[in-house]
Image (cartoon, helix red, strand yellow):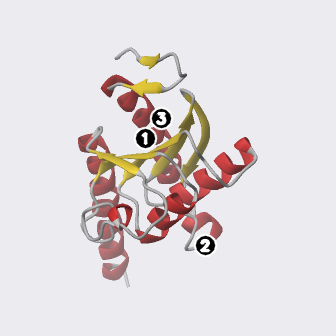
């Protein structure tokens, strides 16, 4: 287990290390596990402010029957409630999969400072894989993006989920 390293300068600016990114991504993986256990796509997110987790979200589309119930959207709502504002200045989101266009747009609108994601999403990723919403120069807010933090375990979790889902669908077809 790595030690979480957070340093603050005289202006109270927080510097996050690789170990810190891994610590918070592990927390996002725990949230993804909750989605998995509920039968949803295992994607989890946490939002951090001043070195503390202020929100957690996991996919709840199946549970809520809501196409917008992505981990990022749920975490954004919780974080806004926590800080008492829709503006999430000074916050970082850690998410196990690259955000889609809906979530990337919401992250920009929330004024969040940074998004750290684990693995790319070549089918719907909007942080560089399919689109790059965050680099659109006409937006009035810039979000710093980092990727690849604990990519392998997050990718494996998603691959296993979809492999099992395809197997389950095939078994259901064969039993009819």
Left of 136 or right of it: where is 104?
A: right
Q: Which residue is mark 2?
A: 66
Q: CA distance from mark 2 to mark 3?
A: 24 Å
Q: Which residue is mark 3?
A: 27
Left of 173 or right of it: where is 43?
A: right
Left of 9 or right of it: where is 169?
A: left
Disc sitting over residue 41 in the figure? none
Residue 118, can we see it?
yes
* Image quarter of the C terminus: bottom left
Disc sitting over residue 29 in the figure? 1
**Residue in the picture at 32% in, 72% down:** 171
Left of 6 or right of it: where is 83?
A: right
Kindly indicate whether the residue at mark 3 contacts the one at mark 1 (C-beta within 8 angstroms): yes
Instruction: Give the mark nearest the N terminus, 2 or 3.
Output: 3
Return the x and y of residue 24 as percentages of the image width and height. Answer: 45, 33
Instruction: Give the mark nearest the N terminus, 2 or 1.
Output: 1
Residue furthest out toward the bottom: 176
Return the x and y of residue 136 as percentages of the image width and height. Answer: 35, 68
Q: CA distance from mark 1 to mark 3?
A: 5 Å
Return the x and y of residue 88 as percentages of the image width and height. Answer: 60, 47
Residue 13, compared with residue 171, is above or below; it is above
Residue 64, compared with residue 76, is above or below; it is below
Label 2 SS? loop
Residue nearest the viewer, comparing 10 with 162: 10
Residue 59, can we see it?
no
């Amino acid at each position: 287990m790595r030690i979480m390293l957070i340093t603050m300068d005289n202006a109270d600016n927080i510097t996050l290390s690789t170990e810190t990114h891994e610590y918070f991504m592990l927390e996002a993986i725990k949230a993804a596990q909750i989605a998995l256990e509920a039968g949803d796509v295992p994607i989890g997110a946490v939002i951090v402010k001043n070195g503390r987790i202020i929100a957690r979200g996991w996919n709840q589309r199946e549970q809520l029957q809501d196409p917008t119930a992505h981990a990022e959207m749920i975490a954004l709502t919780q974080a806004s409630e926590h800080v008492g504002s829709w503006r999430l200045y000074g916050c970082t989101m850690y998410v196990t999969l690259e955000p889609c266009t809906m979530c990337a747009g919401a992250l920009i609108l929330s004024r969040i400072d940074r998004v750290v994601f684990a693995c790319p999403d070549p089918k719907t990723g909007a942080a560089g894989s399919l689109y790059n919403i965050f680099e659109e120069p006409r937006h009035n807010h810039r979000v710093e993006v980092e990727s690849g933090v604990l990519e392998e375990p997050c990718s494996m979790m998603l691959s296993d989920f979809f492999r099992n889902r395809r197997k389950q669908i095939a078994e259901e077809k064969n039993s009819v």
